[in-house]
Image (tube, grey):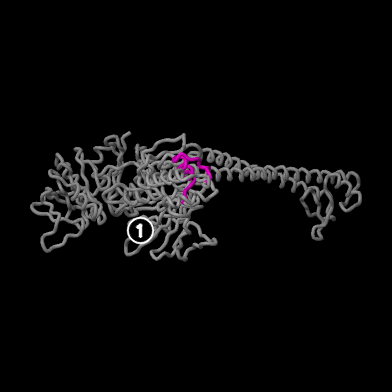
Amino acid sequence: MRIVALAGIELKYLVGRISEETQEYYVSNIYGIDRDSILFKLHHPDRDDILLVVSTAGVWITSVRIQQIAENRLVRRLRDSLLRMRLEKIEQPGLERLAYLTFGGFGKRFVLVGEFFGDGNIILCSETGKVLALQHSIDVRHRSLAVGSEYAAPPSAGRSALHMDIAGYMELKESPMACSRWLGRTLGLPRRYAEGIPRSAGIGPRTRGDTMDDAQIRALHGAADRIISDVISGNHSPVIMRDQAPEAAPVRLASENVEEVSDFMSGLDSVFTQNILERGRRTRSGQSLDQEARLEGVLAEQEKAVQTVQGRAEAIGRVADSMYAMLSSGILRLDAEEAAAALAANGASLVRDKGVPALSILDEKIKISLDAPLQSTASALYVESKRQAAAISSIQDMISKTQRKLEKAARTAQAQQGTVAAAEVRKRNWFERYRWFYTSDGALAVGGRDAPSNSAVVRKHMEAGDRVFHAEVYGSPFFILKGGGSSAAALEETAQATVCFSRVWREAMHGSGSYWVDPDQVKKSAPSGQYLPKGSFTIEGRRNFVRASSLKLCMGIMERDGDTLLVCGPPDAVAKHTRSYVTIEPGGSEASAAAKAVRRELLSMEVEGADLYNIDDYIRALPPGMSRIASRSHEA
């Protein structure tokens, strides 16, 4: 099932909306959804992450994270080129179903082209237009695309609906085509618009152009201008049309069975995501059904083999028995004329296999010696009959294994009807953009992750009455204890977090400490004639030093205002707000391995909410450097 592609006017609205919402965002990760769709995780130090889907059907912001359905071969190349790059701009040429996403940073620039017509395509180009990677190559009459070639846009689909005046519409009076077909061809509009615009003007979509008068043409022009303008400007009331396959539209286009949605982007996200999931379910189910069919074929062959081997063993045994009957009749040799009739009666014959005498029994040729006594030949045949019969047991074992595989494949096919899933992306609290925890007495402590977020914490969130923490270590975060806390414990816990989330953790420098000051002691600008790096501030006056009690942190899941939060902070603070947690200390494994170990421990303790966060979330919560699990605590 193919996703219904976007119209050019819809893409115009989406490009403008996405451009506005993604300003100053950079790419923090790239995931494959399926062969035709890629998910970009965009990050901003002060705003919520954005998930942007680039598909062969269109580009849109999504509120869900779809688990990978099938491998997308572009992902690795895109990660190599675009990770940590800033999304500088998104453009659409005219109303073409094309989008150019420009990424820049580190002295480089790349353009990701989305082509949303036909089978669609996703193409990564250099700044100069050289194709570096693409979904699939193209070699048709009017254009060729391959790795290493120069990117060339497809020919324009028609005249621009944005610049079509009444004189252009008057050309319809000379055409014998239905007005809807003329709109589709001339303006490159999809059927839902080509038919919806005439209906909105009170004209039948199949009305021939050469039968229309000037008033009808003007009405058609007015309806088209209004609908196109409303779609592009966002002045619309979006719906999901459910007459047949669900379609999202920014305006209602003569459909009776519609569902109103809050905005076109969310409606599009709902429909496109559902189509991707359904396609994934069909793909996986089809693969499982193919596996079932293959195993059923194997099982049939194995059962046939049992019958064949069993029939051969019995036949060889009957021939052996016949030799004793020959002896009682006075036949002493198998090459005697009388022996041929006795052998034929039991389905056997005397033949030569490469010059050596042999008995042909069914499809088996058993070599013999004509000079050997018939008793010896019969004995050899009995041995061969038993050997053949013994093979039946092995085949039956194989049949049992195949039957188990077949049962498993059937269960998998049934289960995979609903295994392709999408998780709703939860809206984060403002403090989750930074380091954070709640102290044991309930005060919120928030700290920077890097220079930009250090700057944001102090400049945007520092208020009178707070306590500002810092350590005299290069790369130390600034932590703010909101409201100053109400106990010595809160000060000690925030001091410990400031130390642990600094270079001290990476270097395992035990015995370190930090200090706190009041907000009015923090100067956001450098003294005259001096320079402050981004994320740095001048501290004036007395500093209140607090030694970190230990280099240990805890990770767990806490409940706050009905929300489930993954927290990493000082042991006493985390223990106060969680029932189960994992204690970590410096050393051991890199962040990814440590994050997997922590998540695995929380899941093994059946901590509610631990599965809501992926490995990236756990990595983000960990301090910089290597970590290892020191202990775990579980309260049933």
Q: Which residues are magenta?
A: 187-208
Looking at the image, which is closer to me, 77 or 6? 6
- Which residue is at 80% across, 58% downward? 353
Helix, strand or loop status at disc 1? strand
Q: Is residue 90 left or right of residue 210?
A: left
- Which residue is at 13% across, 59% downward? 526
Residue 360 visible in the picture = yes
In the image, is residue 356 above or below residue 547? below
- Which residue is at 33% across, 57% downward? 88
How many C-alpha atoms fall within 10 Å of the one at disc 1: few (<14), some, or many (≥20)?
many
Label count reads: 1
Residue 92 locus on image (x, y percent) = 39, 55
Residue 403 locus on image (x, y percent) = 60, 40
In the image, is residue 352 above or below residue 227? below
Question: What amino acid type should be assigned to the residue bearing mark 1?
Answer: Phe
Task: Name the image quarter holding the C terminus.
Answer: top left
Q: Which of the 4 image quarters holds residue 472? A: bottom left
Residue 552 locus on image (x, y percent) = 25, 47
